[in-house]
């Protein structure tokens, strides 16, 4: 396998070697997709700044362009999920996003990642409901975006590579029209540290984190809607987050985490943070830098 085609993800915090990022569309029904209408020129500048930040941190960024009209396609974490074996093409419940999986799986394949499974039938799931707790355990939220049929199919697909899917039921919170993913309330950033918003976190998730020795940094309650709990680790203890959550940033830094921020005024209007903006293609632990 050449370095250009390296792939495989079994962690939220191992060294981020390669990532797929989708430059936003500037035309389409932003309001219908649930955005607060952005200044599209500023949106592109912010996204370019985000890409430049990842590059400066040593991440190999594979850049794609969202098709016209797919305004949510810049949130590349959701339509396709990459595992240790390859990519799983998901099916999305949100009407405005139903064309995204086919678009993104083609980009992931172009980047050298094979497809190892696809959700079918009535199954729907967003990648934002999927969080690696360790190399053999994937926590998957059960909410309005990810249903029971998806849990069954994901369990079968991931079971073939020795991964256990653990279900964590999500609260109703603000209802089906509001974005509520499992990763709205948790972001592992090191082998023993995660950012957590406990008031909305499923009890099974909190128990699984505790069983694995994770300590918690509390996301500030006033910053939950400003992507305070949406934190992207580029390596253990080194993270990227939006500049809109300074109190959560301060809590992370107090815990010894190195924090890098990007301007997010316009990107935040789509209710997505740095994890949402990326589709990790390759993460490796420090004692495994092959590929």
Image (cartoon, rainbow, N blue to C red):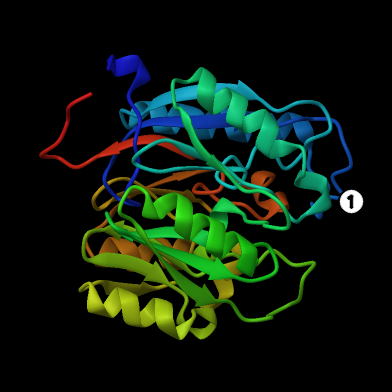
Q: Residues within 10 Å of mark 1 (few under 14, many from 20)?
A: few
Occupied quadrant, residue 215: bottom left
Residue 223: % across, % down: 55, 69
Residue, far left: 287
Q: Residue at x 46, y 60 (%)?
A: 155
Q: Residue at x 69, y 44 (%)?
A: 266
> From what the image shows, is residue 152 above or below residue 65?
below
Residue 229: % across, % down: 48, 64
Q: Is residue 228 visible?
A: no
Q: Secondary structure at mark 1?
A: loop
> From what the image shows, is residue 103 above or below residue 2?
below
> From what the image shows, is residue 79 above or below residue 249?
above
Residue 217: % across, % down: 34, 72
What is the quadrant of the C terminus in the image? top left
Occupied quadrant, residue 271: bottom right
Between residues 97 and 42, which one lies in front from this camera angle? 97
Between residues 7 and 238, which one lies in front from this camera angle? 7
Between residues 61 and 84, which one lies in front from this camera angle? 84
Q: Is residue 281 visible?
A: yes
Q: Residue at x 23, y 72 (%)?
A: 212
**Side (left or right) of 270 relative to 203:** right
Residue 197: % across, % down: 47, 76
**Side (left or right) of 145 relative to 7:** right
Label 1 belongs to which residue?
32
What is the quadrant of the N terminus in the image? top left
């Amino acid at each position: 396998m050449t370095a250009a085609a390296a792939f495989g993800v079994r962690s939220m915090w191992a060294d981020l070697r390669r990532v797929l990022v989708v430059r936003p569309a500037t035309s389409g029904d932003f309001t219908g997709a649930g955005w607060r209408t952005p200044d599209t020129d500023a949106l592109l500048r912010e996204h370019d700044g985000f890409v430049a930040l990842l590059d400066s941190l040593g991440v190999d960024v594979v850049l794609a362009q969202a098709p016209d009209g797919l305004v949510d396609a810049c949130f590349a974490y959701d339509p396709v999920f990459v595992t240790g074996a390859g990519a799983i093409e998901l099916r999305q419940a949100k009407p405005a996003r139903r064309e995204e999986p086919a678009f993104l799986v083609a980009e992931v394949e172009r980047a050298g990642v094979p497809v190892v499974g696809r959700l079918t039938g009535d199954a729907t799931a967003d990648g934002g409901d999927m969080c690696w707790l360790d190399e053999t355990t994937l926590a998957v939220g059960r909410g309005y975006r990810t249903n029971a049929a998806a849990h069954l199919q994901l369990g079968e697909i991931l079971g073939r590579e020795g991964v256990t899917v653990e279900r964590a039921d999500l609260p109703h919170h603000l209802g089906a029209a509001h974005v509520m993913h499992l990763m709205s309330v948790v972001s592992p950033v090191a082998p023993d540290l995660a950012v957590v918003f406990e008031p909305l976190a499923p009890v099974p998730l909190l128990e699984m984190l505790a069983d694995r020795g994770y300590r918690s940094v509390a996301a500030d309650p006033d910053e939950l809607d400003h992507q305070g709990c949406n934190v992207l680790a580029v390596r253990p203890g080194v993270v990227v987050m939006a500049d809109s959550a300074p109190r959560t940033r301060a809590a992370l830094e107090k815990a010894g985490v190195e924090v890098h921020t990007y301007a997010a005024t316009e990107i935040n209007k789509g209710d997505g943070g740095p994890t949402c903006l990326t589709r990790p293609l390759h993460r490796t632990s420090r004692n495994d830098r092959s590929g």
